[in-house]
Image: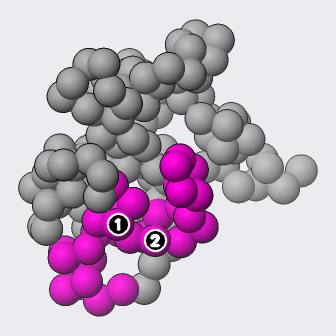
Amino acid sequence: AAFAARLGIYLLRPPAHGQDLLANAQFRWLAATGPAQGWHRVGLVEAQTLANLGYLVLASYENPDPRRPGHIAVLRPGTQSMALLLTHGPREAQAGGINRVSTDTARGFRIHRGAWKPGGSGAIRFYAHSVDWNRLAR
């Protein structure tokens, strides 16, 4: 959410929602309110393509146990083959128990059983938002 704010893009964040279980709330917010804020759901391949084109793209997972945290990560440009994209998912950067500047979705979400499945058939949802880079350069 802090990264989105720096880009001038709204994503549910404190104080509108506390830090506890924020990723779960963001997952629901992206689906329900996100479209009115410029977010749109995209598929696995489109997610990596849009990240490569400079869109802000998120990988979002809601934990099915409402008492346990989900996870959210920012996709980053990647040049992996289609086979690697389908097997390991888009490239991402994340903050959490382990911070990573560059990893793949399979590794970044590995502690969340069922989040990533090859081909993108898991519980992760991808959302994209355009970025006005010219506005940011001023």
Chain part drawn in magenta: 80-109
How packed is label 2: few (under 14 Cα within 10 Å), some, or many (20 or more)?
A: some
The residue at the point 35 percent across, 35 percent down is: 70
Work out which quarter of the rendered image holds the N terminus and state it. Answer: top right
> Which numbered circle lies on residue 103?
2
The answer to whether residue 120 is left or right of residue 79 is left
The answer to whether residue 47 is left or right of residue 17 is left
- Nearest the viewer among 81 and 53 is 81
Q: Amino acid at mark 2?
A: Thr
The answer to whether residue 94 is left or right of residue 34 is right
Q: Can you say whether 124 is above or below 2 in the image?
A: below
> Which numbered circle lies on residue 64?
none
- Label 2 near label 1: C-beta < 8 Å? yes
Is residue 129 shown to the viewer in this render?
yes
> Which numbered circle lies on residue 107?
1
Instruction: Indicate the position of residue 126 as horizontal and vertical percent values.
Output: 31, 48
The residue at the point 30 percent across, 19 percent down is: 67
Q: Can you say whether 49 is above or below 30 in the image?
A: below
The answer to whether residue 115 is left or right of residue 49 is left
Q: Amino acid at mark 1?
A: Arg
Instruction: Look at the image and say whether residue 93 sits in the magenta stretch.
Output: yes
Instruction: Look at the image and say whether residue 123 sits in the magenta stretch.
Output: no
